[in-house]
Amino acid sequence: MAGTRKLGRTSDHRKAMLRAMVTFLLENGKIETTVTRAKEVRAVAEKMITLAKQNNLHSKRQVFSFVTKEAVAKRTFDEIAPKYADKNGGYTRIIKIGPRRGDAAEMAVIELV
């Protein structure tokens, strides 16, 4: 079945979690999370960077409406997007780091390339 993963959450909770994780990723450059969450975050983060590359009013409004911190959204346009100006996609990398100690969930680090 194609589409987004539900991650065991309601749609509102899922969207809020993804917004927070994407904001944190764009702010810090990398985050440690489960593999399935990392794959979902990758899709949204790459969309945000692609929008930021267009750098017009419509794309700014879309990014600012999704990213939870205004400073991070501004940084996406000023610093992150220009870095990938000559690249079409593939702005993030997922590295598996083994199982989590408590519940053996497969963990990964997602980072900006």
Image (tube, helix red, strand yellow):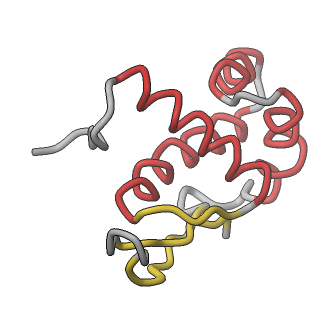
The residue depicted at 87 percent of the width and 42 percent of the height is 75
| Residue 83 in the image, given as x and y percentages of width and height | 80, 59
Q: Residue furthest bottom?
A: 98
Query: What is the count of numbered marks?
Result: 0
**Residue 4 seen:** no
Q: Is 78 or 26 nearer to us in this picture?
A: 26
Quarter of the view holding residue 30: bottom right
Which quadrant of the figure has residue 48?
top right
Residue ID at (27%, 39%): 8
- Work out which residue is located at the far front of the displayed protein and give it: 102
- Residue 26 percent coordinates (x, y): 73, 49
Whole-percent x, y for residue 73 in the image: 79, 33
Image coords of residue 32 (percent x, y): 58, 66
Q: Residue at x 42, y 75 (%)?
A: 100
Left or right side of 93 for 107: left
Considering the image in quadrants, where does the N terminus appear? top left
Please indicate whether residue 27 sits to the left or right of residue 111 in the image.
Answer: right
Foreground residue, 25 or 106?
A: 106
Query: Does any portion of residue 90 appear in the rendered image?
Result: yes
Which residue does the image show at 67% across and 70% down from the upper left? 113
Residue 32 drawn above or below residue 43: below
Name the residue at the left extreme: 1
Left/right of residue 84 with respect to residue 75 in the rendered view: left
Look at the picture and state if 64 lies above or below 95. above
